[in-house]
Image (cartoon, grey):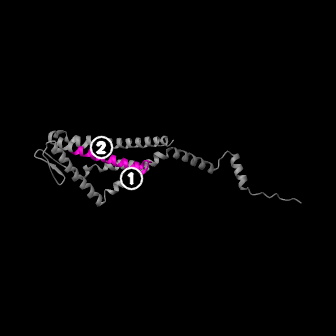
Amino acid sequence: MLTRNRRRKPTGKSLASRARAGGKNPPMGIRALLIVFWRSWYLSKAPSLQFAMKFCSYVLLFSLLSFVPVYQRTVSASATEDARISSAILNRMGENTRVSDGTIWSPRSAITVIPACSAFEYLWFFCAAVFAFPASLVRKIAGMLVGVTLLLSLNLFRVVSLYYIRAHFPEHFDAVHEELWGIVLVLASICLCAAWIGWVRQADQIEPDVAA
């Protein structure tokens, strides 16, 4: 009696062996390779990426704060105080100025210190970098106190110099106001950030030596 040979359905193992025999890698192998590559690349770049993401997040947060009424009143009050202090400095220089609603004026010239002249955007930049950098809270607070104080002092010098230039060298006022001082404040913020980061790294290196 003749019997028919039944064909067996191929199992998963046989299919996998055929795929390997045909030189085709299974999709999981490619995914695993991509995951390993991504993890190795991310771990090598992780500190820089984390700093950049935190920095951008803090800058965005500070920018959103500019729409809060309390913040706007604070900036406006700061601009008025800058005008008052700058006028006092100019009077020491013999300029005989007065202050009215944020305007420094005299018979010779006048400038108005508006909230945009308070340099708060440069303070945002500096504080965002300090917050984003990995350091202890004490060192962050110390860095912000010193950095903010120096930037506010530099901005006072900016207001005083702008009035003086407006009064004595009016032909150079626009260039100094719109171009020169913007570059100076940006460079000052970057230099202060770099100086603070260098101080933090040096302090981190000194502490293990002292403990040893």
Q: Main secondary structure of the magenta part?
A: helix
Residue 189 x, y percent position in the rendering: 33, 44
SS for dot 1: helix
Residue type at numbered disc 1: Tyr
For the residues bearing labels 2 and 1, Cβ distance under 8 angstroms:
no
How much space separates mark 2 and mark 1, taking CA atoms?
Answer: 19 Å
At 71% from the left edge and 49% from the top edge, which residue is drawn? Answer: 18
In the image: residue 46, left or right of residue 75: right
Numbered tag placed on residue 152 in the rendering: none
The front one of 1 and 5 is 5
Relative to residue 23, is residue 34 drawn left or right? left
Q: Residue at x 37, y 53 (%)?
A: 60
In the rendered image, is residue 173 in sight?
Answer: yes
Between 199 and 174, the one lying in front of the other is 199
Q: For numbered disc 2, what is the local secondary structure?
A: helix
Residue 188 drawn at (x, y percent): 32, 42
Task: Quarter of the image for the N terminus: give it.
Answer: bottom right
Residue 185 tag number: 2
Q: Amino acid at mark 2?
A: Leu
Which residue: 20% across, 47% down?
A: 86
- In the image, residue 168 lies at what x, y percent? 15, 39
Does the magenta segment cover residue 149? yes
- Find out whether residue 152 is within the magenta segment: yes
Say few, some or many: other residues with alpha carbon within 10 Å of mark 1 (under 14 / 14 to 19 / 20 or more): many
Viewer-nearest residue: 117 or 74: 74
Which one is nearer the viewer's eye here, 51 or 147?
Answer: 147
Q: Residue at x 21, y 49 (%)?
A: 85
User: What stretch of residues is rendered in magenta?
Assistant: 132-159
- Please say whether residue 55 is visible from this viewpoint: no
Whichever of labels 2 and 1 marks the residue nearer the N terminus, that label is 1
Which residue corresponds to mark 1?
58
